[in-house]
Image: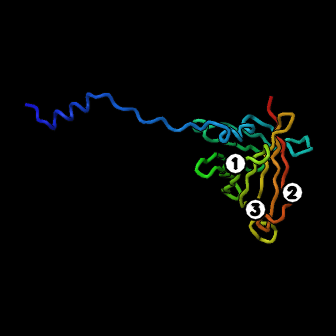
Amino acid sequence: MITAALALVLAQAAAPATPPPAPPKCEGEAYAAFDFWVGEWEVFPSGGEQKVADSRIEKVSAGCAIRETWMPLQGRGGSSLSAYDPSDGAWHQLWVGGVPGRVFFDGGPVDGAMVLTGYWGKDAQGHPSLVRMTYTLEADGSVRQYGQASSDHGRSWSDSFDLIYRRKD
């Protein structure tokens, strides 16, 4: 004789399982704001012809993040992982490299560019250095990564680096 409890377990096991809800998709304008950087690149100083690095930028994690693999011709490489967070409406990037180890940047699109800011290292006097990186899609399809540094928490800025990413053939 089947008990009521056993009958309930058997009935539940025979019932079709309800599939879990699909995860939210990382689609739309906010998620695509940094897609112009995706590709295989050769990197040069702005105005120069001496290549300094290769860089692979790819969409990962079901299209929810952008990963950079930075491969300099000299020195240590590194990687970054950038993603849009709908909870605060901002982009966040984690950079991990040989020096200083890890850096967190925050920001988002500004006038067609991607602007990310974070504290990265120290200036000559030992003060934390705030770095602002502006990524811009240029008319020729290249991407400019222009870096500025501030030792007064963003009240004033000075040029730090200026790189051009050119698509590999």
Q: Quadrant of residue 98?
A: bottom right
Crowd band around label 3 with a 10 angstrom C-alpha radius: few (<14), some (14–19), many (20+): many
Mark carried by residue 96: none
Tell me if label 1 and label 3 are in contact, CB under 8 Å.
Answer: no
**Which percent across, then down, holds residue 39?**
73, 34
Crowd band around label 1 with a 10 angstrom C-alpha radius: few (<14), some (14–19), many (20+): some
Q: Is residue 50 left or right of residue 122?
A: right
**Which percent across, then down, holds residue 83?**
64, 45
Q: Of the residues shown, which amino acid type is indicated by label 2?
A: Asp
Regarding mark 3 in the picture, which secondary structure is present there?
strand
**Which percent across, then down, holds residue 31?**
65, 40
Q: Of the residues shown, which amino acid type is indicated by label 3?
A: Leu
Which residue is identified by label 1? 78
Q: Quadrant of residue 157?
A: bottom right
In primary-sequence order, the first of circles 2 and 1 is 1
Placement of 27 over or under 45, stated as above or below: above
Regarding mark 2 in the picture, which secondary structure is present there?
strand
Spatial CA distance of label 3 from label 2 is 12 Å
Which residue is identified by label 2? 159
Spatial CA distance of label 1 from label 3 is 19 Å
Regarding mark 1 in the picture, which secondary structure is present there?
strand
The quadrant of the rendering that contains the N terminus is top left
Spatial CA distance of label 2 from label 1 is 22 Å
Which residue is identified by label 3? 130
Residue positioned 64% across, 49% down in the render: 89
In primary-sequence order, the first of circles 3 and 2 is 3
